[in-house]
Every structure is written in structure tokens, then in C-alpha cells.
Amino acid sequence: MTDDDVNYWNMAREVRKLLGAARPQWEPLYQKLVPDYARLDTALGSLDGKLQKLTGQGSTGFTRAKDQAEIRTLDAAVPVLQGLKALAHDGEHPTLAKLAKHTRSSLDDLRGPTQVAALEELHTQAVAFATDLAGEMVSATITKKLGDEIALYKPLLGTPNEQIHSTSLLRDDSVALIGEARKALKGLDIRVPNLKSALPDLVAAYAKARQINDAGHGPKNAGTTPQA
């Protein structure tokens, strides 16, 4: 995968993050924006895992990608773990006692499949106790983030050779998904500026997010950038 593809991927993720956070503001105003946003979200949801693998090819890059994915997963686990600890502390959920003994450090000390199994159990219990956790300030979004990070991290536990073996298929799939993201962004570029009178700050932020940061060369336009 080329540097341009990776830069485009990073830009598209920033756009998705921006529009996802602001969705409660723009969706009631502009329903026609929803299909292109959904198309981008779907394409990137599939693309994230594939490009995580591709950008980690080679033993050094692979190890770096795996380490970064592990850190993100552990970070996502912390608020969920804290919520489960609070439930276990009340004494009303004895089945959580063993899991609640974990800390970020103890999860970090685990390795490979054992670590992933513990993280997956954390996520499973969070889903099971979702209603109770909401009372401990652990939302469904926080729990979903843990599940998403586990899904990205788990495939990276294979060896570099196993990853390299699948490079060709991953690249083909990734190129196709980047094409889908480009089509979605083309539609967003047309419609997002129509929100300028209602949500001028969002339109300006969108235009900024649509800049690709080319390492060492600063930002550059990512195609047809809307005028804020």
C-alpha cells in the first residue's frame, strides 16, 4: 500500500470522526447527507483492519503496528474495566469479581491469545451488564469502542510471514474500499457546504479535515475540497 493511500485513509478517518461527532446536529437538518456518510463509514469500517495489517508489513513495521494496536485496545479497556470494578464493589454481581481484579498493568502483562481472551471477556461482560454500566458512566459507545479495537488488534497477533502471505489479497480489497471512500467523499463534498448557513463551524472544520497531511510536505488538497 502506497504512502498516498495511507495518507488518504487517515484523512478519510478524520472526516468520519468529525461528521460522526456532529451527527446529532446535522442529521435532523439534512437527511440527504446520511447515505454518503453511511457509505464512508461502512467503507472505512472494513478498510481500517486491512490497512492496519498492510501498513505493518515487514517485521519492524508489523511489530510497531501490533504494539500501537495493543495500546489503543488497553486504553479502550480502562473505562470499561473501571465500570465493572464499580459493579463488583457493590457486591451484587459476584461473577464479576475475578475480572474486576484486573488493572491496565495486569492486562498489559498478559501476552498473545491470553491477553485477547481477557479483553474479549471484558467486552462480553460489558455488553451483558450494559444497563448497569450506564449507571457507572460507561456508555454503549465506550463498550463498542473496546470491541472495535479488539477486532483490529486480534488479527495482528499472527507472525509477519503470515501477514506477508496475504498481502496481495489485502491490497486488492483495500484499493477497492478506498475507491468506495472516494465516492462517498465526493458526495459529501457536494452536500456539506449546503450546511454553511446552519452550521458554519462544521463546514469549516470539514474543509480543514479534507486536507491530506503529506509527511514532510504539509497539507495538500484531497481532490475537490468544499469551499467553507
Image: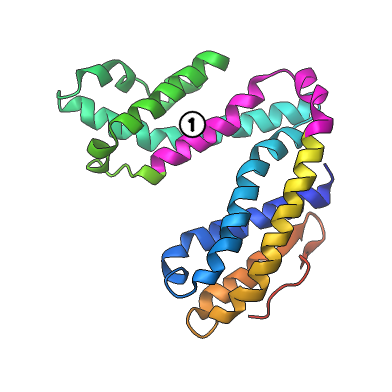
Question: Is 39 placed left or right of 116 in the picture?
Answer: right
Vertical position of residue 26 compared to residue 105: above or below: below
Residue 13, visible in the rendered structure: yes
At 59% from the left and 33% from the top, the residue drawn is: 152
- Residue 35 falls in image quadrant: bottom right
> Which region of the structure is painted magenta?
142-169
Under mark 1, the amino acid is: Leu
At 79% from the left and 30% from the top, the residue drawn is: 57
x then y, percent, for residue 133:
27, 37
Q: Quadrant of the N terminus?
A: top right
Residue 111, visible in the rendered structure: no
Q: Secondary structure at mark 1?
A: helix
At 55% from the left and 15% from the top, the residue drawn is: 113
Q: Give neighbour class at mark 1: few <14, some 14-19, many 20+ (Cα, 10 Å).
A: many
* Principal secondary structure, stretch drawn in magenta: helix
Question: Is 201 placed left or right of 133 in the picture?
Answer: right
Q: Quadrant of the C terminus?
A: bottom right
Find disc 1 in the rendering and name its residue: 74
Question: Which of these two is toward me, 201 or 182?
Answer: 182
Is residue 152 one of those drawn in magenta? yes
Question: Which of these two is toward me, 24 or 205?
Answer: 24
x then y, percent, for residue 20:
50, 58
x then y, percent, for residue 135:
22, 42
At 58% from the left and 70% from the top, the residue drawn is: 205
Vertical position of residue 112 compared to residue 88: above or below: above
Vertical position of residue 29 compared to residue 82: above or below: below
- Residue 38 falls in image quadrant: bottom right
Question: Which of these two is toward me, 87 or 216?
Answer: 87
